[in-house]
């Protein structure tokens, strides 16, 4: 899984990403700066055949003086067909947090400032 900051003109500071799978331990990537134009590896995720499960996401960080975050436990499932590909996370216009699996449909949720 990667975070792609090539669409954003500013660095993302203190980026924190949490991925929770119903039947697996939570994976976290935390408190790193991702420069504008960079694409960084976060962590590896697993998809399972016949696994009755759900995938939940959370992201927070800073862009300039704006502290942002998603809602807690944003729901976006990865499918078995995504197993061999690259899942890409990004910040899009809106602003929104986007999860883009290689095969299954992408998902977006709003980013909120605090």
Image (cartoon, rainbow, N blue to C red):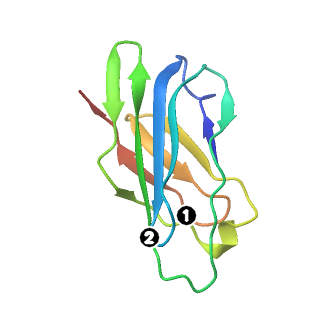
**Residue lying furthest bottom:** 50
Q: Which mark is residue 105?
A: 1
First along the sequence among labels 1 and 2? 2
Q: Is residue 71 above or below residue 39?
A: below
Residue at the (37%, 48%) spot, across then down: 109
- Looking at the image, the residue that sits furthest to the top is 65
Q: Residue furthest right?
A: 84
User: Where is residue 65 drawn, in percent x and y?
Assistant: 34, 13
Which of the 4 image quadrants contains residue 39?
top right
Task: Assess disc 2: are there few (<14), some (14-19) or many (≥20) residues with their C-alpha within 10 Å of its C-alpha.
Answer: few
Q: Is residue 83 above or below residue 88?
A: below
31 displayed left or right of 114: right
Where residue 32 appears, as percent x and y from the top left, is: 54, 26
Residue 36: give x, y in percent of width and height.
60, 19
Judge the density around disc 1: few (<14), some (14-19), many (≥20) Cα neighbours within 10 Å. few
Q: Residue at x 43, y 53 (%)?
A: 57
Q: CA distance from mark 1 to mark 2?
A: 20 Å
Residue 113 % position (x, y): 27, 28
Which label sits on residue 39?
none
> Residue 23 versus residue 70: which sits nearer the camera?
23
Q: Residue at x 48, y 73 (%)?
A: 23
Q: Residue furthest front?
A: 25
Q: Which element is circle 2 on?
A: loop
* Circle 2 residue: 22
């Amino acid at each position: 899984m990667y975070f792609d900051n090539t669409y954003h003109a500013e660095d993302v500071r203190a980026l924190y990403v949490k991925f929770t799978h119903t039947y697996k331990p939570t994976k976290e990537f935390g408190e790193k700066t991702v420069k504008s134009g960079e694409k960084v590896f976060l962590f590896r995720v697993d998809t399972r055949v016949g696994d009755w499960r759900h995938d939940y996401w959370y992201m927070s960080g800073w862009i300039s003086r704006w502290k942002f975050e998603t809602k807690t436990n944003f729901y976006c499932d990865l499918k078995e067909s995504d197993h061999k590909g690259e899942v890409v996370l990004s910040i899009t216009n809106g602003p929104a947090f986007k999860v883009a699996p290689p095969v299954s449909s992408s998902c977006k949720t709003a980013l909120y400032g605090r």
